[in-house]
Amino acid sequence: MFQEIYNKIKEYDTIVIARHIGVDPDALCSQLALRDAIRLTFPEKKVLAIGTGSVKFTAIGKLDKLEKVENALLIVTDTPDQRRVDSVDFSQFAYKIKIDHHPFVEKFCDIEYINDKACSACEILMQFLLEVPLMCDSTIAQTLYMGLVSDSNRFLFDSCTPETFSLVSRYLEKYPFSLSDSYSKLYLRPMNEVRLEGYISLNMNVTENGLGYIEIKDDIIKQFEVDSASAGNMINNFNYIKEFNVWVTMTEDIKNDQIRVSIRSRGPEINKIAESHGGGGHKFASGVKVKTFDDAMKIVKELDALLKEYNEIL
Ligand SMILES: [Mn+2]
């Protein structure tokens, strides 16, 4: 299927690369790396990576402005369903391709390459660039590495396989780049975020079934001078805490009038509960957007019940 995708890339003069809303490093890096590899190989083509960015990720790379295109190819990375694709008018495109590592949700492209065994969309693109005649360089390799490192939470997740390490090894050898520079680009953060992390540590509630949860209200977000997105992203820093196997942050997002519920698990699979509330994600890392903290607490209660069941089976 990689060859088929490459043929389409070769065929179209205008290519737009999109990914999911609520940008994260894997989504961003996969679209930027693919854009840059196509540009490097075919300098005459117009290739745009689009979507809403975040100031958090300015060190990773720059997105392009959305413009009107004609007879263009759309490539969507890191996104399983059409409604979560950021800033795309699907009717504008002559042909559509999906490259993704999430569990299958729906078909919305002409060609869909899905490998839900890959730890990240960037891992799939690492394989892709090795197999097709697209060019790569150290900058592109570093971008792919950053996406992979971020989605695997620095190789902490079981989604990492021998293939993951083999790909990283081959890229480091072929296109050397600085590891420490990659981590600076990904992880350098302001002190006020660390202080908010402290607040979360001090105020996390823990149920007897082993569920950690916390409401992060707008006044707290304002008090610590962080934005709602970075507050919500802190969930990944709370793994490997003995007292809980599932943990949830409920972050108020005043601007979009919603509560972002982020769920992580080291025990039961939690994506079914997320999906039943209109959210989604991976088996052990999911998210849902709801209207009120009451709605969010309903999800917490369901997760707690799931944990109770899970503990009884163990
Ligand atoms: Mn991803």
Image (cartoon, helix red, strand yellow):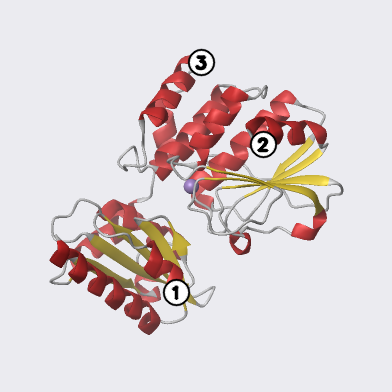
User: Gap between marks 3 and 2, in whole Å?
Assistant: 20 Å
Residue wearing tag 2: 35
- Please tell me whether mark 3 or mark 1 is closer to you in this view: 1
| Residue sticking out furthest to the right | 70
Q: Is residue 61 visible?
A: no
Question: Quadrant location of the C terminus?
Answer: bottom left
Q: Tell me the quarter of the picture where residue 150 sits.
A: top left
Mark 2 and mark 1 lie on one chain; the one further toward the N terminus is 2
Question: With 249 as the anchor, is 140 left or right in this view?
Answer: right
Q: Is residue 177 above or below residue 213?
A: above
* Amino acid tagged 2: Arg
Disc assigned to residue 277: 1
The residue at the point 76 percent across, 26 percent down is: 42
Residue 60: image location, x then y, percent: 53, 39
- Is label 2 or label 1 in front? 1
The residue carrying mark 3 is 174
The amino acid marked with disc number 3 is: Lys
In the picture shown, does residue 185 fall above or below 258?
A: above
The Cα–Cα distance between marks 3 and 1, rounded to whole angstroms, is 44 Å
For residue 271, what is the image quadrant?
bottom left
Query: How many other residues sit within 10 Å of disc 2, few (<14), some (14-19) or many (≥20)?
Result: many
Question: In which image quadrant can residue 261 be found?
Answer: bottom left
Q: Is residue 243 above or below residue 64?
A: below
In-front residue for pair 293/253: 293
